[in-house]
Amino acid sequence: MNTASAQANSTSSADAATKGAISIRNVTKIYDPDGVNVLAVEDCSIEIAPGEVCMIVGPSGCGKTTLLNAIAGFHSITSGQIDLDGEMLCGPGKPLADQGADRVVVFQNGALFPWKTLADNVAYGPIVQGTMTKAEAYGKAVDMLAEAGLSGVAGKYPGEVSSGMARRAEIVRALINDPKVLLLDEPYRAMDALTKSIMHESLLEVYDRTKVTIFFITHDLEEAIFLGDRVIVMTTRPARTKKIVDVKIERPRDYRLLSSEEFRVLVEETKGAVHEEAVKAFEAGERELA
Amino acid sequence: MAQATPNTQKSKSRIGKLVSNVTFWRGVVAILVFLALWEIGAQWKGWFGYMMPFVGKVAPPTDVIAIWMEVGQQPGYWLSWWLSSVRVFVGFLAAMIIGIPFGLAMAVNKYFRGIFFPPFEILRPIPPLAWVPASIIFWPTTEMSIMFITFLGAFYTIVINVLGGARSIDVQYLRAAQSMGASQWDLFYKIILPGTLPSIFVGAAVGMGITWEVVLAGEMMSGGGQQGGGGLGFFIWGSYMGGVMDQVIVGMISIGVAGYISSSLIRYLGHVCMPWRRMF
Amino acid sequence: MSDRDVATQGPSGLSLFLYKTKKSFGTPMPYLAFVGIGLWLFTYWLLNEQLKISPFNKIPGPAEVLTEWFSQDPIWGTSLFTEDYWQNIKASCLRILIAFSLATGLGVPLGLFMGWSKKFKDYTFPVLELLRPIPILAWVPLSIVMFQSFEAPILFLATLASFFVTTLNTMLGVQSIDESYFRAAGCLGSKRRHVFIHVVLPGSLPFVFTGLQISIGVAWFSLVAAEMISGEFGLGYMINASYMVNKYVTMVMAMLTLGFVGWITSAMVRAAGSQMMQWREKALGQGGA
């Protein structure tokens, strides 16, 4: 068993969040495409404290997205249990979690509705949930977009703005629902290094402001260490936790951290484990599931 | 491991899968319900005394099957199949032979496209059936005029698909080939032609559907004189004129089956010609 | 930021059209088109009216058709200035309007539900696939018997043809929507009806309009056939009736009119599509620049 010890978030400030504790216990997921069983996740256990930024690193197709899909309620799990703030999302007798606005996902390729303007996209959640009137929702959407530096493009369609702006708007669309957890599925995968670093800083800024629990999937180790409180390295399929690295670096962080000694040491420490799994995955010729 | 299982077992499990497949059984139920409603609607008058609107005038499926059994023994019915198939085949083949090079030439050469595309676009919106009288006047035999409109029906679709397909080929393939020293002929033969194949087959599949549609109209309108008569279209029209409505439905189903068989053939050819791509 | 806004605002409407037109005259394309159409008409005229080669001289030549078309006092009785010409156009257009509206009104909702609910598709799709291979023309006798009137069978045939196309394309449209939009809607707290209104409906629009483009072409196709076989008024009727009484000039006129009117209707559908999909227009405008 690979149980990551539950651990309080020591580095974030004292006003730490009280909601958004995820507990993943002994989760196993078996896919069954064409009658061939594929073990995607095996006996995986992770405890995430409220307000923690938990980074999941692993080679492509290792099953990390499967975990995220299980939490979000997109896919069922085969066995094990996942809790959010002590309440069972999915587990024995209920393999598929309900989808809900307390766990909002930011997708790999972006999933802003292309037929709605940025403001419409952001205001969408509160309106359909009925938590705000239309006027309130739009007011808040415009304010939050302005906070994210997007006031000039609130009336534009996602296809008209840069991918960086679209991704930022997508995070705003998630945050307006005041979620317990933000689930990010390799959101910056397709971006160039420069845009990516700007996106990182804006995400850090958002986190410092909201202290929302973040479950972030990536295959970029440096991104993981730069953003995270804890980095969990997964094995190649079936996914298990291979190595857990605590990132005890002060917040707020900025780009200068990238050239610091402690950052370099952490990367060195972890690189070996990630590389080993990447080689295994490459040799197995794994293609991504789902 | 699943990979180790031989082919025969795989196909056996496919049939097994079909039988245990919910979608398959729902389809069976849907079609049975449809047939039952048709039967009941058509028989309504005999059973309950008054006629159902619309459906009441249609022959019930049981009658259709009975008359099909009868008609199936007459050589005239099978001759209709043969005549229509020949017309479709000739018109379709002509459309492919003329349409593919024409479309490719327009795709490859800007000036050729500039000159020939506008007249093509002017004529294209005229439905092929509107050509029927003109083509009867123009061609010496009715047979040839039916084949001509059949050709026309498939021609537009094939040209448009070939043109679109050839123009959407990624320029990078061409550059890659050029950098490896390909000649103009190589570019055309090894990249543009295979790159256009998927669109050619899509165009052919759609064109085949139109061809059957058109051949039917030609046969119905030319009215089966000494020359250019017969065919499934005339079979339907003649049955209607003779007031044999169940035979009309036999003709409708026959032509549906014929169309289905020909598009399956094209699909199969597509599989054979394009091993790198499963299109349907 | 504000610079970007100004830059992306760009010209619109008429000025954009004028700009594009002006720009296109910088390329050889419009001149080539002119040459192409001229060459085609010239060949037609040469074979037909000048050299009088058989069988080309059996159908009327371009000069003859054009003079008749624009004549105040047409030899064969029909031109731009006679009432029955417009009456036939009106009859056909009205039928297309009714058939196309019916087919869209029935086909789009049906297709949306088929794409949205697997169960609904399982029960309806097989029946549709059973009927679809039967050519529309094969329905002619049956529809005459079923509807025993002049107008209804014609409308039925035109509607049936475009109904199949619209339904299938709409269904494909729903199935083509990226799974992540459904997931995004789900995790933002949407109920099923919200998903339908905010994801299924707008997401399938591009395919729906592709379908409607084909559908209106198919509607004309079968309308002409129906009008030729049984009908009073309409362009198809005009073609067939003038053929019967050897008014070949009128027949060619009707064919060309048919092509022109058909082209206009499909341009109208295209315009309606871009009007309803502003998001797509704008994104494409940026990407293609």
Image (cartoon, coloured by chain):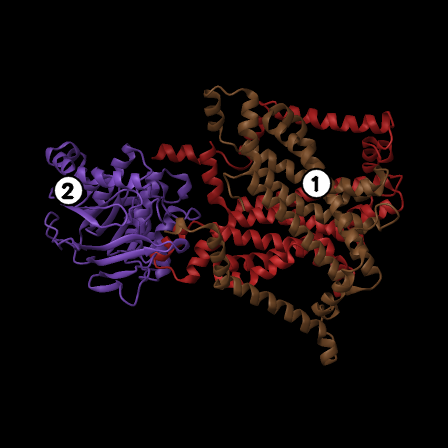
Chain colours: A purple, B brown, C red
Q: Of the residues tagged 2 and 1, which is closer to the observer?
A: 1
Residue A28 coordinates in the image, percent (x, y): 26, 57
Q: Nearer the viewer, residue A151 or C153?
A: C153
Residue A13 coordinates in the image, percent (x, y): 11, 49
Residue B259 seen by the camera: yes
Chain where mark 1 sits:
B
The quadrant of the picture occupied by the N terminus of chain A is bottom left
Answer with left or right where residue C139 lies relative to residue A161: right
- Mark 2, other Cα within 10 Å: few <14 / some 14–19 / many ≥20: few
Identify the residue at image location x=49%, y=34%: C11
Q: Kindly state the secondary structure of the residue where label 2 is placed.
A: loop
Q: Kindly state the secondary structure of the residue where label 1 is placed.
A: helix
Q: Total marks drawn? A: 2
Chain where mark 2 sits:
A
Identify the residue at image location x=31%, y=63%: A95
Answer with left or right where residue A219 lies relative to residue C102: left
Q: Looking at numbered disc 2 in the image, what kind of residue is underneath it?
A: Pro
| Disc number for residue A252 | 2
Q: Nearer the viewer, residue B11 or C212?
A: B11
Q: Looking at numbered disc 1 in the image, what kind of residue is underneath it?
A: Phe
- Mark 1, other Cα within 10 Å: few <14 / some 14–19 / many ≥20: many
Identify the residue at image location x=74%, y=80%: B49
Are the two marked residues, 2 and 1, in contact with CB atoms closer than 8 angstroms? Answer: no
Distance (Cα) linking label 2 and label 1: 71 Å
Answer with left or right where residue A39 lies relative to residue A221: right
Judged from this view, the residue extending furthest toward the bottom is B48
Which residue is label 1 attached to? Answer: B92
Identify the residue at image location x=22%, y=60%: A84
Residue A37 coordinates in the image, percent (x, y): 35, 54
Q: Nearer the viewer, residue C194 or B170?
A: B170
